[in-house]
């Protein structure tokens, strides 16, 4: 069964239309949402560890499958999930989920839209909106959401089809990166100072000093000899650039020293590691997954795996209602009455031997419980 037809006109996403009317975020007046969005974008760009950690979380969250309560409709649902268009460049509901979760972690909230084909009353695609331009307010009831788009002139335009909007936010709507700009600013200053110090002391420079004797001939020709030494030294250094080695020959007392050789660069290993520890603790990712080998025998312990698994399960709980809404919307558009559920892949963070031992222990425990129930 074909869900989409070629050359079928698609309705433009309402969020996209509103964003075009509202112009870009850079033309808006100063607002906390727009400021934080740009700040977090710059933070991920400036600190590669933060960007890598968010990408790792998105990938570790794992794949999923939408399951229909009516098995006869499962084929159509699978075809929709694998072929639905996402924005301008994506395809499949997994692509939408990755972008949605990335926005959720970075900005603290994420918004998307189910775009309908008005002529055929089917879903034409999914759209990832800009959460910084969306304002969520309470409707007529405490649990009703109203969505508005912030316009360029500071006004708000209500979204006409709120039932097509999917929305999720972290606890309090706060970004996972909250609190990191200050630490990252210190880290960037340390790296900037390291670069400046290597520009000054890392690029070897020489001090050539000519010391004339007390004779009248040396004193009267000091300037000429100094200029000659300078020319010969510059010629020898320039020849080295092209692989030609020239000896420097001078008459008299000439002293050659490396500028800054007696100084030492500051040891930045400890402060940089302390800052990275704070960043990694906020992102809840084991350091070695980010390439930080602070210990030669570092590996993920069972306790770390359990903690990371609980973090990933939390993000799955936030994503599941959004994915169910999309699946149910597709079933309704096809005239089906079933409900949709989300089945996530198992999170595999342990070795296969550990997983096998865990399954064995669970089987033994279930066997013992069964025997106790029979005895009782």
Image: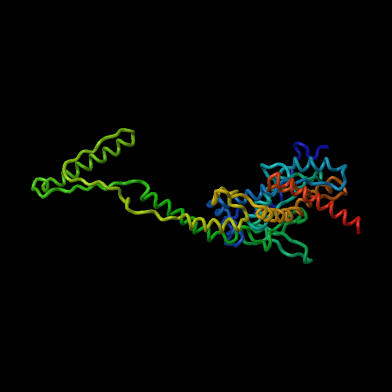
Q: Residue at x 82, y 41 (%)?
A: 76
Query: In this orientation, does residue 19 appear?
Result: no
Q: Nearer the viewer, residue 195 or 3?
A: 195
Residue 237 image-quadrant placement: top left
Query: In this orientation, does residue 56 appear?
Result: yes
Q: Position of residue 249 (x, y in %)?
A: 21, 38
Q: Position of residue 210 (x, y in %)?
A: 19, 47
Q: Residue at x 68, y 62 (%)?
A: 171
* Residue at the farthest front position: 375
Left of 52 or right of it: where is 72? right
Q: Position of residue 303 (x, y in %)?
A: 67, 55
Q: Quadrant of the C terminus?
A: bottom right
Q: Nearer the viewer, residue 152 or 77?
A: 77
Q: Nearer the viewer, residue 33 or 338?
A: 338
* Residue at the farthest left position: 216
Q: Position of residue 62 (x, y in %)?
A: 70, 47
């Amino acid at each position: 069964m074909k869900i989409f037809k070629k050359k079928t006109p698609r309705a433009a996403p309402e969020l996209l239309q509103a964003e075009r009317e509202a112009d870009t975020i850079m033309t808006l007046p100063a607002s906390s949402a727009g400021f934080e969005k740009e700040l977090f974008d710059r933070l991920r760009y400036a600190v590669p560890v933060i960007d890598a950690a968010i990408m790792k979380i998105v990938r570790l969250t794992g794949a999923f499958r939408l399951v229909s309560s009516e098995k006869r409709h499962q084929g159509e649902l699978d075809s929709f999930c694998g072929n639905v268009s996402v924005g301008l460049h994506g395809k499949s509901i997994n692509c939408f989920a990755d972008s949605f979760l990335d926005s959720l972690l970075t900005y603290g909230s994420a918004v998307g839209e189910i775009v309908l084909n008005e002529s055929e009353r089917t879903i034409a695609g999914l759209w990832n909106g800009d959460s910084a331009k969306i304002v969520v307010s309470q409707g007529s009831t405490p649990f009703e959401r109203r969505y508005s788009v912030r316009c360029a002139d500071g006004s708000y335009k209500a979204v006409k089809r709120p039932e097509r909007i999917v929305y999720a936010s972290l606890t309090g709507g706060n970004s996972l990166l909250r609190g990191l700009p200050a630490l990252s600013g210190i880290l960037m200053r340390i790296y900037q100072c390291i670069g400046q110090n290597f520009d000054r002391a890392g690029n070897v420079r020489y001090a050539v000093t000519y010391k004339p004797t007390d004779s009248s001939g040396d004193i009267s020709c000091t300037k000429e000899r100094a200029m000659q030494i300078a020319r010969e030294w510059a010629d020898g250094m320039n020849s080295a650039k092209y692989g030609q080695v020239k000896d420097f020959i001078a008459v008299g007392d000439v002293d050659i020293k490396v500028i800054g050789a007696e100084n030492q660069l500051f040891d930045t290993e400890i402060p940089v590691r302390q800052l990275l520890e704070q960043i990694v603790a906020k992102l809840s990712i084991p350091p070695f997954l980010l390439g930080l080998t602070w210990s030669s025998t570092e590996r993920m312990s069972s306790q770390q795996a359990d903690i990371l698994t609980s973090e990933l399960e939390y993000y799955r709980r936030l994503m599941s209602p959004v994915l169910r809404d999309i699946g149910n919307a597709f079933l309704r558009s096809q005239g089906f009455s079933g409900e949709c559920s989300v089945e996530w892949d198992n999170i595999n963070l342990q070795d296969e031997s550990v997983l096998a031992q865990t399954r064995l222990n669970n089987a033994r425990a279930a066997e013992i419980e069964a025997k106790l129930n029979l005895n009782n």
